[in-house]
Amino acid sequence: MLSAETMTPNFNKLNPITGMKRLFSANAGVEGIKATLKSALFAYLAWTAIQANWDDLMTLGFKHTGAVFVVIGTILHQMSLKVAIAWLILSALDYAYQRKQIDKQLRMTKQEIKQEMREMEQSPEMKGQMARRRRALSRGRMMEAVKTADVIITNPTHFSIAISYEAGKMHAPKVVAKGQDLVALKIREIAKEHRVPIVPNAPLARQLYKKCEVEDFVPREMFQAVAEVLAYVYRTMGRTGRVSFTQSEENLILATC
């Protein structure tokens, strides 16, 4: 990729205040102190090597050429060995210090951790919006199920429970929709539009609403009451012509008790 961004004039780089801040920053100060101490240490080690061979250095003028090279080589060897050992030790210490500094720079602040957790877990507003969408979708599916339900059992005003049963396919009647107050009213309205029978039975409606969730099968202890409602509805529906059931099919619900 070709980009002229690096060629764009940046006057911040020419700002003397910014340059002074970089020059006299804490990191620059530490690096300056380290460089000064290293130089002083290396100079001391070189001086100790020279001092250890001072007598030989003073007599170099009286030695032949080969001996001079031997003395100078010995001094350089001692200097190099001491400096190399010191350099290795300082490098190990500097590596540990630099690594600690990098870890410190990479460490997130409390605010950054909170922000990351919010992004990972999503904000409460987003969670609430998603929950509302899920409820809306679930309610939409539930209202669609009301249209094909066999009966709506009501309180008659506070609760509405839609029951569905398919002989031979279900081992028990199933709660396909339920609601309270405004939702219960909406269920009754949809049931009336699609000619789904509505049967008032306050005790049964309260128990079904309390013990059953949508898509749950009716508990065994309520089989008898629900079966009687369904049998009544089947007989009524047979007379109205919506669906025709045989007597054996009507008795099938009662037989589940």
Image (cartoon, rainbow, N blue to C red):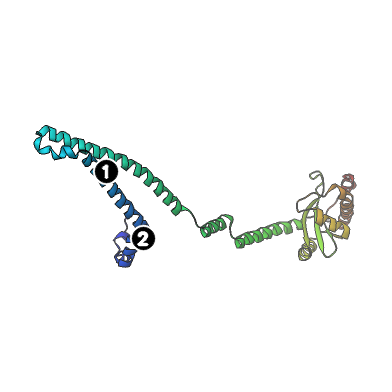
Q: Position of residue 25 (x, y in %)?
A: 36, 60
Q: In the figure, residue 140 lies in which quadrant?
A: bottom right
Residue at left 65%, top 60%? Answer: 133
Q: Amino acid at mark 1?
A: Leu
- Badge 2 local density, few (<14 within 10 Å), some, or many (20+)? few
Q: Position of residue 15 (x, y in %)?
A: 31, 67
Instruction: Specify whether residue 150 is in view.
Output: no
Q: Residue furthest top?
A: 66
215 to the left or right of 23: right
Is residue 17 or residue 257 the one in the foreground? Answer: 17
Q: In the figure, residue 58 lies in which quadrant?
A: top left
Helix, strand, or loop for circle 2?
loop
Q: Which residue is mark 1?
A: 45
Residue at left 83%, top 53%? Answer: 243
- Residue 24 sits above or below residue 59 on the image: below
186 to the left or right of 13: right
Is residue 5 or residue 55 the one in the foreground? Answer: 55
Q: Which residue is mark 2?
A: 25
